[in-house]
Amino acid sequence: MTPPRATYRLQLRENFGFADAGAIAPYLARLGVSHAYLSPIFKARPGSAHGYDITDHAELNPELGTEADYAGMIASFRREGVGVVLDIVPNHMGVGGADNPLWLDVLEWGEASPKAGWFDIDWSVHRGPNGGRLLAPVLGEPYGEALRTGKLALKFDAEAGTFAVWAYDTHKLPVAPPTYPMILGREREALEWSGDRFRDLPNWRPQVAERARVLEAELVALVRDDADAREAVAARVAAINGDWRELDRLIEAQFWRVAFFRVAEDEINYRRFFNINDLAGLRIELAPVFAHAHARVFAMLGAGEIDGLRIDHIDGLFDPKAYLVALREQADRPFYLVVEKILAPHEALRADWPVEGSTGYDFVNLALGLLIDPAAEGAFDDSYRGFAGARQTFAAVAVASKLRIMDHEMASELAALGRAAARLAKTSPLTVDLTRGILVRAIRLILAHFPVYRTYLDLGGTVDEADLRDVAWAIARARRGDPDLHPSAFDVLAAALTSDAAALRAKELGRTASLRFAMRFQQASGPVMAKGVEDTAFYRFNRFLALNEVGGTPDRFGVAPAAFHKAVAQRAGRWPHAMLATATHDTKRGEDSRARLAVLSERPDEWRRQVAVWSRLLRARIGDVEGVAAPDRNDEYMLYQMLVGSWPPDMLDNPSADALAAFADRIRGALTKSMREAKLNSGWAAPNAAYEGAALAFASEALRPDAPGFLSAFLPFVADVARLGVQNSLVQTVLKFCAPGVPDTYQGTELWDFSLVDPDNRRPVDYGARGAALETVGGPLASSEARARLFASLMETWRDGRVKLATIALLLSLRRERPDLFAEGDYRPLEFSGAEADWGFGFVREHGGRRLVMMAARYPAKREAKPDWEAAALLPEGRWFDHVRGRAVEGGAPLRTWLGALPAAVLTEA
């Protein structure tokens, strides 16, 4: 298996499908990437914007194109020498609607469905007259209102001979065939006889479903050939829909319970992806489910259509390692394999996983951290406290946010863990008095303090030292969080979560039962972390938005060079082919937005003054002299960072009214999402229209072209920060393409990426413009003599983004010329001397006697203020070729004299 040289992420959707992806294959090849990295391509819910709500693992998504379109895309890539890495989704499927045959079968037959065991469903939660019922939280209003106002309607499918209740004509809820007699009635002899045979279905076990299909076919023939029967069925359907009480009686007899979507917060009885009701968790650990979900994937690998897989949400699986081992063992050939895994700063990817590494969220935050001046942390604290009145640490905000999530949106998941823990406790007389309520309180606090997404205990009882450490950390803090809770609750949970055989034996608790509880806990801890921290705390703690990124830690203000070197050296030794990312479809702001915001860490005092000026101007405009109107100060502080980070380069001078209006729409969308995710002044379930309206009006006021007070104060500052931010962006780019690993370019980010949170970062990409831009730089890049002039020219016109594109193209060319050096080369820090030694950064890579040096300058604002800064790179002996300036050089001079137009240099031995 040859790992990718470099990947390019494509988000496929209805307006950019297989044919469109194939059409840009020549551009990707010219750019220099080796593999297209595709978002999920299997059949998903209609209108899916991302493809993660898969409804059929065997069929391609028809919205992306036909089988022929897919084959054409693969052929186009192959002609250009571009391989494919495919993003797959083993954790969950899209449900609701009328598109998932597996889910519809479970709704129709309940626990008797052969597919019922494919999903994590607790049938004990909702009971009906015929047994367990699956919650269907698809209603946008309380059940009674939907029922009485006709939002729920019975329908007959005359071509299939089946009945279903439909919610809003969108969500199909199949009627169980044994209850058809309630519909067919007794008015017509033929229908009564048909109903009588449907009533007899339970006597056909275990072939009930097969017998039902026969009876449904007979019903099809009856209504087709007998006009009276056809009219009678229609009349019965109309009568039931006209009497909501009768429709309610029919619904009550089903294997599903249709409900208001908010009921899921407390009473959902199937495992979800996070708190999303229409994504149901799969039991991929079961062999039949695994085989079904991967049959097409393995066929693609075997046919050479794809070369690698990216596994979505690996932490959602029951046993991640076992899943990955099964992938390796059941595929016909070796393939590239990476996992989406978010690591805490102290955490390492599991060394025994048979993967090439992660998708690179750790690198996102390492690279950014290197650009941030840690000396500014105190000033940023003061600024945030002074303006927003924020006093809590991020750790406290994170704990509060996770508790909020468990008390509301994910109360069902907490309740499910409580039920599982109570069942375990009741198996021993020594723990039987630990009630579900007590255990829920303890579990809630442990999850709130959990320092990682999950631990990885397996059914064999294997436990890692890291797991023991993280569980102990969480339980120690949980104990302090509720000193009134009896300590035995924590003792039992600690024993189960660490598979402590001695402690379990002392409590007379079965080890296997304890392991199963622990593994269910592990599947729940990740969603609590994701929704509580990334999707809540990151929108509450607005001290410095550049740090509020997926996989990041907002309380880690910058990364020291030594810490960067240590982390990357470990990657080079253990995961040399892991992905290197600086932007993904899930990052919360563009890679160049974060790099630009990093400049603020060099100018904290000026930032504080500017924010105060902007606030006075805008609040005066809306007549809020006291500063108490919406948005609150925390949201306002966030807005200013949002504006600085995402302000388009072509709007730095006298932006037009149309440009301001278009940008204002994007800002309002991101601001709305941010307010709702924070769950303080508004929320998704119950938006606060008054607050949101006032906050959006405030943002719009800042972007009004006919009221230039704010803009006249804002534009000079953002223009200066943007100019300096370009240098940070280019350092970040060079880092990614020179460090050990597989650099990934998220679609379109080869030019500037000042996008906001999704869906803004999934906007259509203009590949025509990018192709034309690449043509303009390709020729000069190929000429060593022309490169210095090219980069000097591109820096003068930096706003068009071609300087970033040219940098990427140059480094991809270098990776293509020296694949072994980049793929296998070792890594060691480059040392610097001088008064400003920490302003320089670099490393050396070596393989097979060939060496490469990357060195860069940090802190553009500080360097501009002190042009004669002193930092000298201690280069290895030898003659070097400078690929940016296109000439042979020798070492020994100060770093600033090495830097031409770019703030970084890439050297190989001449």
Image (cartoon, helix red, strand yellow):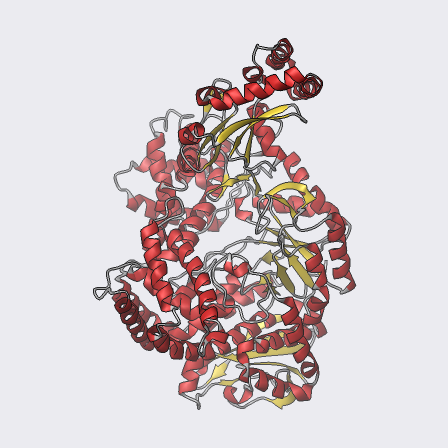
Q: Residue 621: percent from the left, percent from the top?
A: 28, 68
Q: Is residue 191 left or right of residue 408?
A: right
The one of 733 and 494 positioned closer to us in this rendering: 733
Q: How many marks?
A: 0
Which part of the image, by quadrant, shows the C terminus? bottom right
Residue 84 position, x and y percent, is 70, 57
Image quarter where the N terminus lies is: bottom right
Q: Quadrant of residue 91?
A: top right
Task: Say if 436 sits above or below 774 in the image.
Answer: above
Q: Nearer the viewer, residue 891 or 77?
A: 77
Residue extending furthest toward the left: 626
Q: Residue at x 45, y 51 (%)?
A: 452
Does residue 196 sit above or below 479 in this rendering? above
Identify the residue shown where x is 35% and y is 39%: 442
295 vs 640, left or right, is: right
Which is more toward the observer, 378 or 802?
802
- Residue 361's place in the image compared with 116, above or below, is below
Q: Is residue 251 visible?
A: no
449 left or right, relative to 193: left
Task: Examine the rendering and report whether any part of residue 694 can be seen.
Answer: yes
Q: Position of residue 703 (x, y in %)?
A: 39, 68
Spot occupied by residue 890 in the image (x, y as percentages of width and height): 61, 90
